[in-house]
Image (cartoon, rainbow, N blue to C red):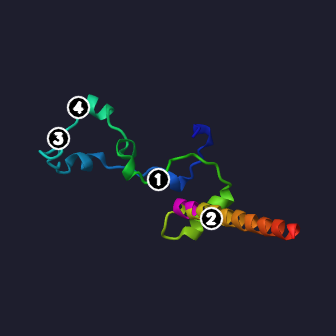
Amino acid sequence: MKPKSLKLKASDAAPTIDWAAVDAAPKASVPDDESPALSRLQAAQLRPLADALPEFSAGKTRITIHLDDAVLQAYKARAGGRGYQTLINETLRDAMRKEQLTDMVRAVVREELHRQSRH
């Protein structure tokens, strides 16, 4: 996203973080024996789980898409407690299924019309 395209409202400003309180908080004993710290080399070699084990892939791909503001607002409002991106995905999936069904019906109708024209 280009920095000039970001439009922040006063309500969108980042919350103030009390770093002194964060620093004073007790530290967990991590890493431990079951999760040792990674070296920089090991961290650089990490791959997404779906790349390492394709059978565990969620079957989703991160993309960037530009939507009309009105469309985005409508989906956010309609989504309620669920994620609006999930709702957009479901809408696209339903449209894809309807298109496949429509194509199948058209093929059957064409086949029947072709049979009738031969008789």
Instruction: Measure the alpha-carbon separation of dots 3 and 4.
Output: 9 Å
32 to the left or right of 43: left
Numbered disc 4: secondary structure: loop
Identify which amino acid the numbered label 2 is placed on. Answer: Arg
* Cα–Cα gap, marks 3 and 1: 30 Å
Q: What residue occupies the far left of the structure in this picture?
A: 33
Q: Element at badge 2?
A: helix
Q: Which residue is mark 3?
A: 36
Can you say which quadrant of the picture contains the C terminus? Answer: bottom right
Q: Is residue 3 above or below residue 63?
A: above
Residue indicated by mark 4? 39
Q: Which residue is mark 2?
A: 97
Q: Nearer the viewer, residue 8 or 51?
A: 51
> Residue flagged by tag 3: what amino acid is it?
Pro
Callout 1 crowding tier (Cα within 10 Å): few <14, some 14–19, many ≥20:
few
- How busy is the neighbourhood of tag 4: few (under 14 within 10 Å), some, or many (20 plus)? few
Depth check: give the residue in front, 5 or 104: 104
Regarding mark 1 in the picture, which secondary structure is present there? loop
Mark 1 residue type: Gly
Front one among 17 and 32: 32
Quadrant where the N terminus lies? top right
Residue drawn 71% across the image and 62% down it: 103
